[in-house]
Image (cartoon, rainbow, N blue to C red):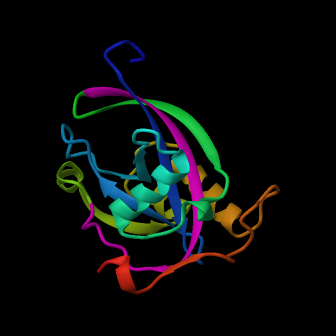
Amino acid sequence: MRGAGAWHRSTARVLPVDPQGRVLLLHGWDPHHPERPFWFTIGGAAEGGESLRDAAARELYEETRILLDPAQLGEPIARSTIEFSWGGIPIVQEQTFYAVPVASAAVSLDGLDPWERATTDTYGWLSAEDLEAGEPPAHPEIPSLIRTAASRVRGNEPGNRQGGTAGSVDMSGGDAGA
């Protein structure tokens, strides 16, 4: 799939973590395979000269209406490259994952573009165990990423720069969406 026909993109992915250690994920499907739904992380490609941290904050707002300063994302928790097909298009995607504590959030899918609306039906706050027991994740590394994100924002992992829930996002009202 790494051939000239593949779409190469650099993406920023966000794992918002609630006080119970659950991560906000979106639920959807490949338009060519709606019979195989899955859970996936929030995020998308960096645009123009946009930094990955800025792209992560923009995508979080566009896809969930959770607004935060990109500086709140801290350092990435993981990076990976995956290859997959979406709507029949081969994609090679470099991914940078950020975790951010979220004290409470009113989530809305109103900011999804028409293509995303056609292939995304809901969201959920899920633990790694929830995800392993239910519908599959888009990629098998997502449960591990949930564990890493929860550990990082709770301050349980060496090298944590975000420490606990200090500085968490509280989006319980205002522009957070319905």
In the image, taking residue 115 as reference, residue 48 lies left or right, namely right
In the image, taking residue 22 as reference, residue 26 lies left or right, namely left
Q: Examine the image and state in which quarter residue 146 appears.
A: bottom right
Q: Residue at x 81, y 55 (%)?
A: 159
x%, y% of residue 80?
A: 57, 36
Q: Residue furthest top?
A: 3
Q: Main secondary structure of the magenta part?
A: strand
Residue 30 falls within the magenta-colored stretch: no
In the image, taking residue 157 as reference, residue 32 lies left or right, namely left
Query: Do we see residue 73 in this rendering?
Result: yes
Q: Residue furthest right?
A: 158
Tag count: 0
Q: Examine the image and state in which quarter residue 86 appears.
A: top left
Query: Do we see residue 137 in this rendering?
Result: no
Depth order, front residue of 37/155 = 155
In the image, taking residue 66 as reference, residue 97 lies left or right, namely right
Q: Residue furthest front?
A: 49
Depth order, front residue of 19/50 = 50
Q: Residue at x 40, y 87 (%)?
A: 173
Q: Is residue 107 above or below residue 15?
A: below
Q: Examine the image and state in which quarter residue 153 appears.
A: bottom right
Q: Residue at x 63, y 45 (%)?
A: 78
x%, y% of residue 141?
A: 54, 44
Which part of the image, by quadrant, shows the N terminus?
top left
x%, y% of residue 130?
A: 48, 64
Q: Is residue 40 above or below residue 85?
A: below
Which part of the image, by quadrant, shows the C terminus?
bottom left
Residue segment shown in magenta: 89-111
x%, y% of residue 117?
A: 20, 56
Q: Is residue 100 above or below residue 117?
A: below
Q: Residue at x 77, y 65 (%)?
A: 156
Residue 99 falls within the magenta-colored stretch: yes
